[in-house]
Structures are given as C-alpha cells and as structure tokens.
Amino acid sequence: MAPRGIHARSTAETSLRKRHARARLFALFCAAVTWAGAALLMLLLYQISVNGFKWFDVQFLTSFPSRFPYKAGIKSALVGTLWLISLVAIISIPIGVATALYLEEFGKKGRLGRMVEINIANLAGVPSIVYGIIGLAVFVRGLGLERSLISGALTMSLLILPVIIIASREAIKVVPMTIRHAAFALGATRWQTAWSHVLPASFPGILTGVILALSRAIGETAPLIMIGALTYVAFLPEGPMDAFTALPIQIFNWVSRPQEEFHELAAGAIIVLLIVLLTMNATAIFIRHRAEKKRG
Amino acid sequence: MAEFTPTQLQSKGVTQLQDQAILALQDVSISYSGKAAVSKVSFPIAKHKITSVIGPSGCGKSTLLRALNRMNDFIPNVTTEGKIIYNRQDLYAAEVDPVEVRRNIGMVFQKPNPFPKTIYKNVAWGPGINGRKDSMHELVEKSLKQAALWEEVKDRLDESALSLSGGQQQRLCIARALAMAPDILLMDEPCSALDPISTAHIEDLLYRLKSSYTIVIVTHNMQQASRISDYTAFMEMGDLIEFGKTRQIFTKPHKQRTEEYVTGRFG
C-alpha cells in the first residue's frame, strides 16, 4: 500500500506545481495587458502634452477662436461645454434615477417591465449620430428650439439616459432585500423605504454610473454636429436658448485645418477637456468616499 | 380584542385559551403559486404572553408568522385565505392598509438586519416616518434600555450600527421594533444566527418584555420554546398539529406526533 500512496502523492504534487505555474502565467498575462493599455494612454497623453502645452496659457483660456493661431482661444468652447454638461446633468440625472427607481422598486415585474428593460439596453447601444438625428428632428425642428444649448443638452441627455438607468438599476438591485423588509416592518411605505434606505445605499453605485455617462456626454461630438452646434462662436451663451459651441467641436474644427499650429491648438484644447473630465471624476470620487464613510 | 368563542376553538380541536386573545387565526391557508405552505390553521394569540410556533424546517411556521403582519405581500404569487382577526378586523380585508398593520404589528427577522446608518437613526427612523417629532431622544433611550442594549451603546449612538456584534445588532433590531410601541411583536427565529450568550441575553429580554408586549416567536429550538413561551403551536407540513399551553405541549401532549417531536424522536 505504501508505495502506491507515495506515488499518488508525487503525481498530485507535480500537478499542483503545474497548476501554480499556470496561475502565475495567467497573472503575468493580465499584468501585461493592463500595463500595455496604460502605456498606450501615457503615450497619447505625452504626445498631446508635447504639442499642446506651449499654447496652454491664460490667453488661450480667455480668448475667442480666431483665424490667427496666436490669438485663438477656447473661451466660448469651454463655457459652452460647462453650460452643456450642467444642463445635461440637471435633465438626465433626475429622470434616469427616477426611472431606475420606478423599474426596480415600484413597477410590476411583468412582460411590460421586461420589454422596457430590453429596450433600454438596446438604446444604450444605438450610435450617437442617430441620437443627433433625433435631436435635429425633434428638438431643433419639431419643438422649434433651434440650434441652442437646450437642444444640445436634451439630445445628449437622450444619449446617456440608458447608461444612467442601467447603472442605477444595477446599484439598486444589489441593495439587500432584508433592508427593505426591515423598513416595511416598521410601517414604512414603498416611497419612504426607497427614499430613506434604497437610494442612500445605492448612491455610490448610481454616482459611478452618472459620472461615466456624463464623461461620455462631455466628449461626444457627432450629435452636436448633427444638431448644428456652431463651429465658430465669438460670443458667450447667456442662457439655454443661445447658440453655442463645445470643446469637442472646437477640437474637431482645429484638427481639420491644414496649418500645423491649429493641430497644436487642438492638443491644447484636449488638455483642457481632460482637466474638466478629471475634475468631474475627482469630485465624484470625493463625494462617494464621504458618503461611504458616513454609512460606515 | 378578537372574538374567539370557546366553542369555535373546540370545534377546531384547539385547546381553549384562558387568556384574552389579541389576535385570532381562523382557517388560515397560504400557498405559493398554488402550492400549499400552510393549510387551515386556527389558533389564538394571547395578549401579553409569548406564543411560540415550533416544527421541523419547511413546516410553514415562518410563512405563517409573516402572514400576521402582511410581510408575505412582498413575495410574488402568495395567496392567503382564511381570516386573521385583530381588533375585530380581518387583516386581509380589502379596506385594510397593510402599512397600518405593520405599524401595530412589528417584526424581528432571522438575521440581524440593521440599517446601514447610525445606531441612533436605526431606532429613531421608524417613529420619525410615522410622524413622531418630539422627545425622540427619550424614546431612543427608552427603547434601547428595553432591549438591554443601552449600557453598551450609550456613548456611541452616532457610530454605524454595522460596527456592533451580531448579538448587539439583533438587540438593536428589537429596540427598533419596540420604538414603534407595537401591539404585537413577531420574531422569526431571532436567535438562530447568534451564539449561546447572545441567545441568553435575548431570551431574558423577551421574558421581561412580556409584561407589556404580546410576542409570537418562531423557533427551531425546542428548549427555547419551552423556556420562554406560555403557549405553543406545533406545526408539521403546513398543518397545525397541536396548540396549547407550553407546559401541556411539552409534558402531556395530546397528539402522538407532538410527543415524538418534542422528545426529539424526529425533526
């Protein structure tokens, strides 16, 4: 019996060694892929910085676009983007979160609910240019909102609503059922339960989804071109009904010029866009961190 | 209080209740998607007494307990038949608001489920949403004292409830339920996730609460049922086998099945 036992053990050990080796190999592969992605991103950032930073100064931020590169700036585009993203946030967050809350907490989980669910998932995959066409037909022409900030914001909101709804639903779904039951057992209504317990518990997840969605909106160009945001704007929008331009459009405009200087200006504008984006993300992380700490 | 004449009880083969009934189950049947979980169960719940419901796993005792404050409403495809009379009113009558029912009939669950908020807010939230505004501090203190938790948490009311141990969390859940001043407190195996010391804590607590609350407790633990309860209902496969005074059920059961169960011959 003894030799057989030893034999069995040694094969088990070889196979264990093999399994460890395979695990290490896989970890190595994952690390390589991760770093390859990060390196590519670094390379892009490096190239943009090299080209763009020499134009990046106060004059660049506070000037309107111009046909002379040394006079050109992104004032109107930056202000337009800030306007746009604020309006998009105001429109899309309440609608998106309320929809998710309704679908998860209040709506009957029947055939209709499943159909809505599938449709929302499909909408998330529709190309942005299609939303641009809808925006042009419905908001610009149909409702007569013209080529205004509000048209752009409504179009962008349509574009990112599916993302917000899906992310919020997932965040709401993982709130334990036992918490809802605890609230119901204290004589809470569905609304009180959702407002006081489900929403706060799912807040970090919802915030992540919202930020991803807004980040997408801030970089989208196609729908804005479609609804006819202007490419040359030498004034600041003063209200939601004003015409506007936005950073991606300004970048697109500069890149399509033949002169090298304008390409560098585009790089400078990309830096500004990235800073806006990172500021938004950092704010979200800060808020989420505080919310999580508060809940303990 | 519930109308439950002795003849009615005897006609169902149920031992007569010597105390005043606060709640009365009459031919209660519950099924999930047509599959019966509880069939035609009738027994009364005595006021300011502890009634325990015992039986093997899957006998329908938890389902029955959840029916008493309409928590089964949240499970899809549950149908409840028969009557549960509380204050001369059938809890399942069309005009009854289940939210109102749960305000008066509280519940403590099998696993401690405190809200991921501070200890204070866990207790104060229920009364708060039900319109209580003044002397909330006193109420929180009183409820935590009733649940024998005050001494342990009085200096850390602003800490998260999740920082408490399992036994403390369960006592917090009891305090939370007591803060609503419920007529009846339903407990679904409240000690099954706890160690023996925490269990002893909670049993002591239940014993003291009896003077002012009516408690219905579902338990797996027969020693627990015999230690703390005044009345016991024994269920098996969705049927009520026997209901009576706890001492009678555990020492002189009328049904052979009950005797086999309480003496540990099965289950």
Image (cartoon, rainbow, N blue to C red):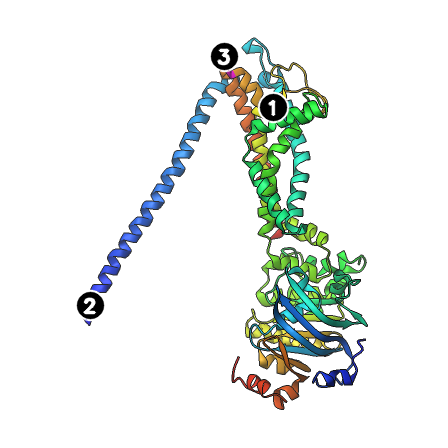
What's drawn in magenta, residue-wise? Answer: A255-261
In primary-sequence order, the first of circles 2 and 3 is 2
Question: Is B132 situated left or right of B201 in this image?
Answer: right
Does residue A289 show up? no
Residue A164: % across, % down: 60, 39
Q: Quadrant of residue B172?
A: bottom right
Mark 2 or 1: the one toward you: 1
Mark 1 or 3: the one toward you: 1
**Count of numbered tags:** 3
SS at mark 1 in the image: helix
| Amino acid type, mark 3 | Glu
Residue A271: % across, % down: 52, 24
Circle 2 sits on which residue? A4
Circle 1 sits on which residue? A224
Asked whether A260 falls inside the magenta stretch, the response is: yes
Question: Is B216 situated left or right of A118 in this image?
Answer: right
Query: Relative to the observer, which residue lies in front, B138 or A33?
Result: A33
Residue A79: % across, % down: 64, 23
